[in-house]
Image (spheres, rainbow, N blue to C red):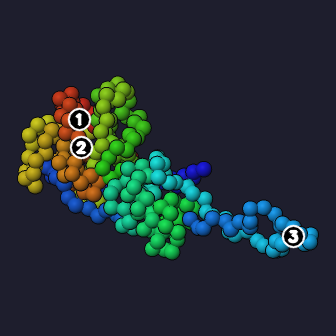
Amino acid sequence: MRTTGMGRSLAALAALIVLSGCTAQAVDAHGKQPPPVRGGSGGPSASEDGKESGKPGAKPGPAAPEVLWSRGDKGRDVRELQARLHQVAWLITPPTGRYDSPTVKAVKGFQGKRGLPRTGELDTVTWQRLRKMTHEPASWELYPYGGQPAAKPDPRCMTGRVLCISKTSRTLRWMVDGKTLSSMDVRFGSQYTPTREGVFSVYFKSRYHVSTIYHTSMPYAMFFSGGQAVHYSSDFAARGYYGASHGCVNVRDEGKIAALFAQVRNGDKVVVYW
């Protein structure tokens, strides 16, 4: 039996920037008991004189806690476990959704530190202790290096040629007449330099663009609002969601954005939404 501990939370971002370029900036990362005691191999035995030799009144030991996940399990629940272990610094690697050897080692360490049996299996007692010490992981914590499923397209994306960009799932869909032609992970601005939301259009493309403010490379830039553009980010490719832009929409897959850049035209719609 497996149980699911679901949930996602993301802080809403607001404010405007109208700079002529943007680049990456750093942000904070926030952020089994023993088996039951059994009596003998059978009931009380009778001695040769007919008297019982068993001990009357014996009580069974406490039941072992239920195991929720263990080595070999996969899925979003395991990803949440890994994200919570990462919060308390027992798991350094990002969540993968696979209950692998590093996860077993992290669970054993967490259990041993708190006086629990070091089984490496995630049981109900261990899970309750871990949940009390951590917060529910946000989407970016579950998928710090991308790979998250794309959100449902906004209704405004269903007609025409659209860069449909979801802040909830941190994904971009390239859509034509309601059909998704490609999708990719994206990253946004920080709390102090948020990416603007709304409906825009691509007004300028620059294959080898360099920011005039930060003097950093912004390959495959497609500007849609002031200095904010969709562009490739080597920092995003290297650090994932442990960083942020200065307002632009970063793409980490250079091959995908190169193909997208070749298809997008000036005047194509851009929708940024939650």
* Residue located 82% across and 71% down the image: 54
The location of residue 196, given as percent across then percent down, is 28, 49
Separation of marks 2 and 1 at Cα, in angstroms = 8 Å
Question: To which residue does mark 1 refer?
Answer: 256
Q: Is residue 66 left or right of residue 129?
A: right
Kind of element beneath mark 3: loop
**Crowd class of label 2 (few under 14; some 14 to 19; many from 20; radius 10 Å):** many
Mark before the other along the chain sequence, 1 or 3 = 3
In this rendering, the label closer to the viewer, 2 or 3:
3
Decide: is 61 above or below 4: below
Q: Looking at the image, can residue 260 be seen?
A: yes
Question: To which residue does mark 3 refer?
Answer: 47
Decide: is 115 above or below 28: below
The location of residue 25, given as percent across then percent down, is 20, 58
Mark before the other along the chain sequence, 2 or 1 = 2
Place residue 186 in its image quadrant. top left
Question: To which residue does mark 2 refer?
Answer: 251
* Residue located 36% across and 67% down the image: 89
In this rendering, the label closer to the viewer, 1 or 3:
3
Amino acid type shown at disc 3: Ser
Separation of marks 1 and 3 at Cα, in angstroms = 81 Å
**Crowd class of label 1 (few under 14; some 14 to 19; many from 20; radius 10 Å):** some
Place residue 189 in its image quadrant. bottom left
The location of residue 78, given as percent across then percent down, is 46, 52
Q: Nearer the viewer, residue 98 or 199?
A: 98
Mark before the other along the chain sequence, 2 or 3 = 3
Q: Is residue 75 left or right of residue 201?
A: right
Amino acid type shown at disc 1: Lys
Q: Looking at the image, can residue 76 be seen?
A: no
Contact between marks 2 and 1 (CB within 8 A): the answer is: yes
Q: Is residue 176 left or right of residue 259?
A: right
Amino acid type shown at disc 2: Val
